[in-house]
Image (cartoon, rainbow, N blue to C red):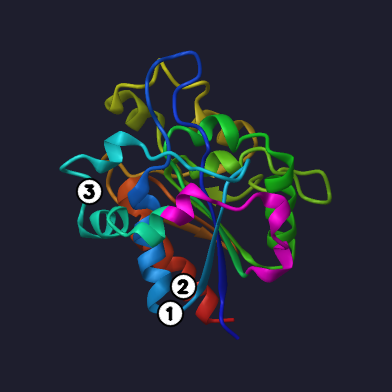
Amino acid sequence: MTKRILHIVTNVGSYEGLDYPTGLWLGELTHAYDEFEKYNYIQDIVSPLGGNSPIEPKSLGRFMADQSVLKRKNDPDFMRLLENTKKPSDIHWQDYDAIYYTGGHGVMWDFLDNPELQEITKNIYENRGIVSSVCHGYCGLLNVRLSNGEYLIKGKKLTGFAWCEEVLAGVAKKVPYNAEQLAKEHGASYDKKFIPFAPNVVKDGNLITGQNPFSARVTAEAIIKALEKK
């Protein structure tokens, strides 16, 4: 059976209360999308509200926009997918083998407490599907509770964009919360590389997480390896 991946992207295009743009970090989607495409996986893109997912301008900068990003950015068909994302109510969680939360700072606002996405994530996880994220995408996992009432991440090893990386990115005073700290408060065993922005992927059972934008491809590879064993 062909595997199916559910990508989650943001609808938020600016920092709350600030005239400061953000959005989807495009490479975190395209690098994973490329890897899944090699295996002919079926891929769908969902956002909390459906419709347009704005792109983080910094992800299109000269040092970030590699061949993968530029190819997808210049592909009208792919960009239409981001302009017309599905809503959570449009999909059935039973159809998917893995859910993959992408990042970009926008997700800090619309991923954290979305009940529909939390329900989808819980169901995929409890039915032994892969729950995964990269960079700020782990904000979508921080408040997910399982059927027993416990946080999904409690007692689990994971990673995501580190607070030191927020500081180095110059946005520590602009973000609404410290995601790394919240992960720890909810019982996760948080892991990060000693060197900021180094690729890092952490696997704990069917939970697979990547630390930063440079971790998207290795995170996708880890997801593929887990799926191909099934």
Residue corresponding to mark 3: 65
Q: Amino acid at mark 1?
A: Tyr
Residue 144 image point, x, y percent: 69, 43
| Kind of residue sitting beneath label 2 | Ile
Residue 222 vertical position relative to residue 137 in the rendered view, above or below: below
In this view, the residue farthest toward the bottom is 1
Left/right placement of residue 14 relative to residue 26 reads right
Would residue 116 be counted in the magenta stretch? Answer: no
- The stretch in magenta equals 80-96
Q: Is there CB contact under 8 Å for labels 1 and 2?
A: yes
| Residue at the image position 30 percent from the left and 50 percent from the top | 214
Instruction: Kindly give the residue lying farthest to the right in the view shown.
Output: 148
The image shows residue 216, relative to residue 10, as above or below, that is below
Give the vertical position of 209 relative to 228 (above or below).
Answer: above
Q: Earlier in the sequence, mark 3 or mark 2?
A: 3
Q: Secondary structure at mark 2?
A: helix
Q: Residue at x 44, y 54 (%)?
A: 80
How many residues crowd mark 3 within 10 Å: few (<14), some (14–19), many (20+)?
some
